[in-house]
């Protein structure tokens, strides 16, 4: 009986040893070497934007997909830095909260770098120079910025267009002139619809966005009487603690600017640089 028991134990030990020889011996923290770097899982980041801000982000009526300058740019940056990105459409006022709540990793939505926003988030290096301008219908008696005193303007809520209108309102009042009546609306499309419907005298918005609207809606006969009256720069917003993501974004942005990819995307949406 004892001999039989010993024999059984020895046989079991041999079987276990042979079986173990077929298992991986890597430690839990060891990354397997497949010999093919393309099989290595890539970091995936979620980017968000508000898709009523053409040509930076908008829903293509043909494909019903979100597209635009910002969408193409973040995908190019992802390719250059070796990560994957998914772009999601959210309401403007939800963008920074989604970032801070870790529902998203990046805000890529024509967002101007401002001191106020820098209190909450970090920004990439600037990727686009813009400015606020005002637009009216053809035939309007508003010819200069000063003519806006006492008028009704439409802006998108919590944007630099809204901030510019508030500053202009204060300036007019300080100069003893009538202030602005400011209509703050949910998205960029609402702003232009308000002008079209006659609910305001003028709109204040980013100059490239006004120009895109004019290009796509020539029958509305909207004009920009003067150049932009502010200068501002767009950046990609990130959480302050995500230093590695900051580095990936800035390195990728530098690469696409250096290799001509940025210029190709720019020309697709804005034409050749002047």
Image (cartoon, rainbow, N blue to C red):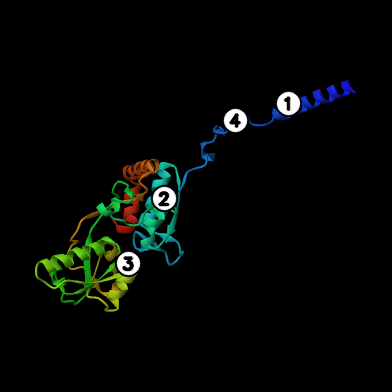
Q: Indicate which disc residue 17 carries.
A: 1
Image-quadrant location for residue 94: bottom left
Mark whose residue sits in front, 3 or 1: 1
Q: Indicate which disc residue 248 carries.
A: none
Gap in angstroms between the C-alphas marked 4 and 1: 17 Å
Residue contact between numbered discs 4 and 2, judged by CB atoms under 8 Å: no
Q: Indicate which disc residue 188 carries.
A: 3
Q: Which residue is mark 2?
A: 105
Q: Position of residue 208 (x, y in %)?
A: 27, 61
Q: Are there few (<14), some (14-19), or many (20+) residues within 10 Å of tag 1?
A: few
Image-quadrant location for residue 188: bottom left
Q: Are there few (<14), some (14-19), or many (20+) residues within 10 Å of tag 2?
A: many
Q: Earlier in the sequence, mark 3 or mark 4?
A: 4
Q: From the viewer's perspective, is residue 21 above or below residue 236? A: above
Q: Which residue is mark 4?
A: 26
Gap in angstroms between the C-alphas marked 3 and 4: 54 Å
Label 2 SS: loop
Q: Quadrant of the N terminus?
A: top right
Q: Residue at x 35, y 53 (%)?
A: 265
Q: Position of residue 122 (x, y in %)?
A: 32, 48
Gap in angstroms between the C-alphas marked 3 and 1: 69 Å
Residue contact between numbered discs 3 and 2, judged by CB atoms under 8 Å: no
Label 4 SS: loop
Residue contact between numbered discs 3 and 1, judged by CB atoms under 8 Å: no
- In the current view of this chain or complex, which residue is farthest to the top? 3
């Amino acid at each position: 009986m004892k001999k039989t028991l010993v024999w059984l134990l020895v046989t079991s030990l041999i079987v276990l040893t042979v079986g173990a020889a077929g298992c991986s011996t890597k430690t839990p923290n060891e990354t397997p070497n497949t010999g093919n770097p393309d099989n290595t899982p890539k970091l995936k980041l979620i980017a968000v934007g508000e898709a009523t801000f053409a040509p930076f982000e908008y829903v293509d009526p043909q494909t019903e997909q979100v597209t635009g300058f910002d969408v193409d740019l973040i995908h190019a940056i992802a390719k250059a830095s070796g990560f994957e990105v998914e772009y999601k459409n959210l309401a403007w006022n939800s963008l920074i909260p989604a970032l801070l709540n870790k529902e998203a990793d990046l805000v890529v939505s024509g967002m101007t770098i401002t001191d106020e926003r820098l209190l909450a988030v970090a920004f990439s290096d600037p990727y686009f120079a813009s400015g606020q301008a005002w637009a009216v219908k053809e035939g309007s008696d508003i010819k200069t910025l000063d003519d806006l005193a006492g008028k009704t303007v439409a802006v998108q809520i919590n944007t630099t267009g809204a901030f510019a209108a508030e500053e202009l309102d204060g300036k007019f009042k300080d100069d003893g002139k009538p202030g602005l009546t400011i209509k703050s609306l949910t998205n960029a499309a609402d702003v232009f619809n308000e002008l079209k419907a006659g609910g305001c005298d003028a709109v204040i918005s980013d100059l490239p966005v006004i120009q895109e609207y004019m290009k796509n809606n020539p029958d509305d006969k909207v004009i920009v009487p003067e150049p932009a009256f502010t200068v501002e720069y767009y950046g990609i917003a990130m959480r302050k603690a995500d230093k590695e993501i900051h580095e990936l974004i800035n390195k990728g942005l530098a690469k696409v600017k250096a290799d001509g990819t940025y210029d190709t995307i720019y020309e697709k949406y804005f034409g050749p640089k002047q």
